[in-house]
Image: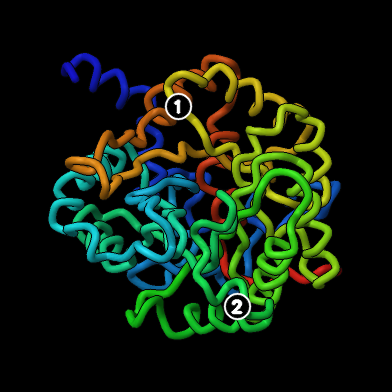
């Protein structure tokens, strides 16, 4: 990158660095309001008696310190299958050497927190994430939960035989005691379902997630895509006594009927547009304009779903940077009339509301 180009990028997103350093006046000494009701956005910066907390790989943190947040990214993903994967398949030193420069790059652009969405049995490595957090200075969140998409290829054998309560007990134990024998605790749940109607297995996963949420307050981020499984999961959550505010509709951008965004967000669910790339920024502009114009900005999240070190490929394969939001989308949004206040809400306040650990009961 030339010096001229680097100066342009920093000029376009200079406010981000200020926000991450706690200098943005909109975020000094304030934290976002309680979740909105289904039909009314929450007040922007109401004080809380008890500060919200998040759980990073380095420990519990005041959620106000999240700063600019990428809410859906990946460091390493291992597609070999639940029965074969494990940390012995990759060299952590090699992964750090490859990935760390990408993390330092977004740190320099003002990013403060990265939410790492690789699930169990698909390459999740909390020890690696802790090391990358320490060396980059980024706050990183990891997860608990199981990934049911791709015809259950990434589910462990016990997922097929255990009940929803037994699965929930595993995830609750990880929240309380740490993941895989470490003291590193998850900051949210990551599950996954197939397109179309929910199978019995995937209904069990969302019931387990609901029961885990009621015991832990962890948010449920579900790889979903289309509207049919999204609303199927929301209905199960409601039957289990969990408010849709605890649910993130991951990859909502795959659903082409934007009215479905409005319907789910109106119930309180989070609409996560998390496939941003350098080739689709105009499409993301249109989706974000829709959410803003329908007064659903307070239920909107955005990220890249980028990264993806692959152990089976030489050198980890091609690693997609996490920079498009900073270098292309933010300038595009500003050029189309989005205000700094709206960007603050999207990139700082909404992630706090989405990932802060607290139980969100139906009717609560």
Which numbered marker is on residue 167?
2
Q: Residue at x 37, y 53 (%)?
A: 80
Give residue 264's quadrant in the image. top right
Residue to which mark 1 is pinned? 277
Nearer to us in this view, 223 or 5: 223
Nearer to us in this view, 175 or 163: 163
- What is the secondary structure assignment of the residue under circle 2? helix
Q: Residue at x 74, y 64 (%)?
A: 200
Figure label count:
2
Give residue 221's quadrant in the image. bottom right
Instruction: In the rendered view, tell whether residue 182 sits above or below residue 151.
Output: below
Nearer to us in this view, 90 or 10: 90
Q: Is residue 144 left or right of residue 50?
A: left
Q: Is residue 351 visible?
A: yes
Q: Is residue 163 left or right of residue 125?
A: right
Instruction: In the rendered view, tell whether residue 311 sits above or below residue 322.
Output: below
**Which comes before the other along the chain, label 2 or label 1?**
2
- What is the secondary structure assignment of the residue under circle 1? loop
Locate residue 338, reporting x and y percent: 59, 24
Locate residue 280, reporting x and y percent: 51, 20
Within 10 angstroms of label 2, few (less than 14), some, or many (20 or more) residues?
many
**Quadrant that contains the C terminus:** bottom right
Q: CA distance from mark 2 to mark 1?
A: 35 Å
Locate residue 160, reporting x and y percent: 61, 72
Within 10 angstroms of label 1, few (less than 14), some, or many (20 or more) residues?
many
Locate residue 137, reporting x and y percent: 25, 55
Which numbered marker is on residue 256?
none
Instruction: In the rendered view, tell whether residue 325 sits above or below residue 359.
Output: above
Q: How is the image coloured?
A: rainbow
Instruction: In the rendered view, tell whether residue 342 sits above or below residue 25.
Output: above
Q: Is residue 49 visible?
A: no
Q: Residue at x 36, y 67 (%)?
A: 57
């Amino acid at each position: 990158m030339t010096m001229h180009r680097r100066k342009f990028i920093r000029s376009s997103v200079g406010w981000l660095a200020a926000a991450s350093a706690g200098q943005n006046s909109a975020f000094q000494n304030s934290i976002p309001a309680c979740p909105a009701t289904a039909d009314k956005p929450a007040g922007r910066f109401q004080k809380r008696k008890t500060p919200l907390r998040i759980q990073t790989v380095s420990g519990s943190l005041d959620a106000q310190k999240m700063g600019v947040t990428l809410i859906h990214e990946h460091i390493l993903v291992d597609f070999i299958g639940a029965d074969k994967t494990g940390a012995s398949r990759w060299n952590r030193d090699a992964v750090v050497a490859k990935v760390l420069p990408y993390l330092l790059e977004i740190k320099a652009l003002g990013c403060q927190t990265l939410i790492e969405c690789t699930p169990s049995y698909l390459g999740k490595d909390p020890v690696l994430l802790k090391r990358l957090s320490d060396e980059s200075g980024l706050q990183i969140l990891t997860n608990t939960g199981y990934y049911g998409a791709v015809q259950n290829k990434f589910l462990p054998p016990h997922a097929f035989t255990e009940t929803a309560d037994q699965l929930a007990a595993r995830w609750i134990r990880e929240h309380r005691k740490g993941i895989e024998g470490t003291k590193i605790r998850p900051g949210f749940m990551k599950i996954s379902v197939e397109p179309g109607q929910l199978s019995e297995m995937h209904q069990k996963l969302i019931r387990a997630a609901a029961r885990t949420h009621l015991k832990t307050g962890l948010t449920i981020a579900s790889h979903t895509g289309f509207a049919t499984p999204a609303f199927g999961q929301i209905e199960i959550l409601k039957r289990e006594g969990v408010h849709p505010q605890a649910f993130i509709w991951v990859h909502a951008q795959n659903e082409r009927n934007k009215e479905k965004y409005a319907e789910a967000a109106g119930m309180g669910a989070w609409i996560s547009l998390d496939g941003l790339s350098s080739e689709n920024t105009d499409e993301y502009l249109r989706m974000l304009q829709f959410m803003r114009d329908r007064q659903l900005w307070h239920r909107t999240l955005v990220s890249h779903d980028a990264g993806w070190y692959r152990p089976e490929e030489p050198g980890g394969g091609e690693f997609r940077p996490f920079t498009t939001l900073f270098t292309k989308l933010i300038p595009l949004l500003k050029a189309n009339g989005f205000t700094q206040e709206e960007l603050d809400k999207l990139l700082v306040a909404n992630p706090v509301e989405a990932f802060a650990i607290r139980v969100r009961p139906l009717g609560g």
